[in-house]
Image: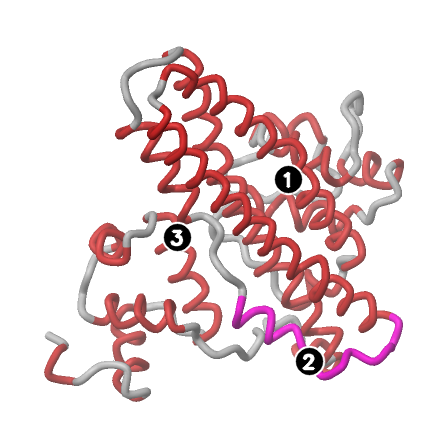
Amino acid sequence: MISKNSVFAPQTKVADMLDCNNYLIDVLSRLGIRLGFGESTIEEASIRSGLDPATVCLICNVYTFDDYAPDAETLSKGRITDVVKYIRNSHRNYLTRELAWLQDALCQLILSFSEKQQKVIWRFFNEYKAELEKHFAYEEDKVLPYIQDLLFGRDTHGFTISEFAQNHSNIEEKLSDLKNLVMKTLPDSGDPALREHILRFLFYLQNDLARHTFVEDRILTPMAWYIEHPQAIRSSEKKEAPVREELSDREKEILVSVAKGMLNKEIADQYNISIHTVISHRKNITRKTGIKTVAGLTVYALLNDLIDINTVE
């Protein structure tokens, strides 16, 4: 069995890992590890599927444990091509399976709605779908080919992984709005069981997309950075050398709110985002600045002229 304070290792049995987090069934599917693994360990199942066991553990740990952020040594043992494979398969799964099911389910649910209500729902859904497609297209057309070029020593045309990190947009907020519409706003008609099923699915999808982002931010981005800067791993001596990134505009807003003493829920309400998104932003702020405490972040904000000292208690 796996203790609450441990993470998955190559010798962990796959079945024990799934007992700890059954959502990893989808992760294994995207990696190409099929069910029917018996008493196999992660190492054995990975090797049979042509995957690097350390990388499979990395992805499953980041997906499962909120505070898990691998250090330079751990990342150096992984294989970025397996991460790229996972990202590509995830994109395909979201667009051809998850969104397709959601679209069909919504179609059935709103049959009894007025024509106006149906149009409003479809417009919102199609806007979200287009946003997701655009987000994935940027990664498929720009970021993942860049990593391939980087690995083969080809011309990367001045692009760096820090550019991706600074412009990595959030894909949860509109989905959160759709979830709240289904839960609170849609007319009380249609199949109630289907509506509940859709709502459960939206909660799952929101969490799954957030953890997909974790994999990109905590594994793909730093792995690529270390390939760009191989001397960083050699000189790290097991100490993490984080990607030197600038805070995004939204992260600066969150930082200012934290410095002013606002709670996560207050910040979420102010910017109309989920608490989960606030927490994700705060983790990114800590990763980029290396500062963990509210007091330290307040000093950082003051020194970088993000806030006026008179606005801080």
Residue located 53% across and 53% down the image: 68
In the picture provided, is 111 more to the left or to the right than 38?
A: left
Q: Nearer the viewer, mark 1 or mark 3?
A: 1
The circle on residue 95 is: 1
- Mark toward the start of the polypeptide (1 vs 3): 1
Please tell me how crowded label 2 is: few (under 14), some (14-19), or many (20+) other residues with Cα within 10 Å. Answer: some
Tell me which amino acid carries mark 3: Thr
Residue hosting label 3: 277
Residue hosting label 2: 232
- CA–CA distance between discs 2 and 3? 30 Å
Q: Magenta residues, as a range?
A: 152-167
Q: Secondary structure at mark 3?
A: helix
Tell me which amino acid carries mark 1: Leu
Write down the quadrant of residue 159 in the picture: bottom right
- Mark toward the start of the polypeptide (2 vs 3): 2
- CA–CA distance between discs 1 and 3? 22 Å
Residue 266 visible (yes or no): yes
Which SS type dominates the magenta stretch?
loop
Residue located 47% across and 25% down the image: 106
Q: Which part of the image, by quadrant, shows the C terminus?
A: bottom left
In the picture provided, is 149 more to the left or to the right than 212?
A: right
Query: 172 or 82, which is in the foreground?
Result: 172
In the picture provided, is 60 more to the left or to the right than 284?
A: right
Pinpoint residue 226: horizontal percent, then vertical percent: 70, 74
